[in-house]
Each structure stands twice: as C-alpha cells, then as structure tokens.
Image (cartoon, helix red, strand yellow):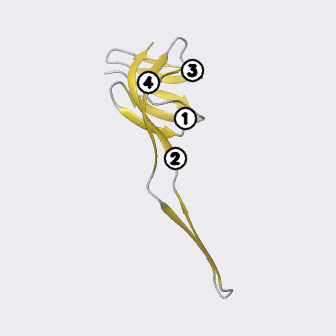
Amino acid sequence: MTRAIVEISGKQYHVEAGRYLDIDTYKADVDTALTFDNVNVVLTDKDSHIGAPYVKGAKVTAKVLAHGKQKKIIVYKMRPKKGTRTKQGHRQGYTRILVESITV
C-alpha cells in the first residue's frame, strides 16, 4: 500500500492509490488524466521518502471522475438591537479524482 501527501492548488492532501479524493474545483474535463509533481511525503510498505520541500521524481497520477457542489451551508449574520439581518447560502464546488498510482 503506497500513500503520499501531495500539494494540489495550495492545499495538502493525504492520498492513497485506488481511492478517490474531493479537491477544490480543478479545470479539467471528466476522464482526463492528471499528474501532480508536488509530492511532500511518500510512504510505502518498506520505506519512506520525505522531501525538502518535495520528493524528487515522485509523481501522483489521477483521473477526473466528476465535478459537483457540496452540501449548502447557511451564513446568517445578525446585529442585535439594530434590526439588521442577512441570510446567505453557499455551496462550494469540488472535483472528484481517483488516484491511480503513486510513483517514486
């Protein structure tokens, strides 16, 4: 089992080969292959590779499965004794990717 910590769009994600992951909206079509080179840590059954800041030659390949939006959250602001209320909803967009392989 190979696991890694990879940096995607300025955020770090813990990934594992064969599992899917929801990341911030990524501009890529469905069924497109993606390659991420900014790998911070790679853990295998036998050894580990820690980068400073990235592991040289390490790559994570993934495939885009779908695009969507998360569950709606409600943002409610109220100022007491002023009669001011604002209610706003927000749905964050995401891209679901399937991690196919992690290579060192």
Q: Given the image, on which type of amino acid does mark 2 rest?
A: Gly
Q: Any mark on residue 26, and which? A: 1
Q: Which amino acid does the dot numbered 1 rest on?
A: Tyr
> Which residue: 52% across, 24% down?
40
Gap in angstroms between the C-alphas marked 1 and 4: 12 Å
The residue sitting at 47% across, 24% down in the picture is: 32
| Badge 2: residue crowd in 10 Å (few <14, some 14–19, many ≥20) | some
CA–CA distance in space, label 2 to label 4:
19 Å
| Crowd band around label 4 with a 10 angstrom C-alpha radius: few (<14), some (14–19), many (20+) | many
**x, y percentage for residue 35?**
51, 20
Q: Is residue 30 shown above or below 47?
A: below
User: Residue 23's x, y, as percent?
Assistant: 49, 38
State how far apart marks 1 and 2 are (Cα). Answer: 9 Å
Q: In the rendered image, which residue does mark 3 sit on?
A: 54
Judged by depth in the image, the label closer to the viewer, 2 or 3, is 2
On screen, 96 above or below 75? Answer: above
Lower sequence index among marks 2 and 4: 4
Badge 4 amino acid: Ala
**Is residue 1 toward the left or the right of residue 54 in the image?**
left
Answer with mark 1 or mark 2, whichever residue precedes in sequence.
Answer: 1
* Residue type at tag 3: Tyr
Classify mark 3: helix, strand or loop. Answer: loop
Tell me the residue that label 4 is attached to.
Answer: 62
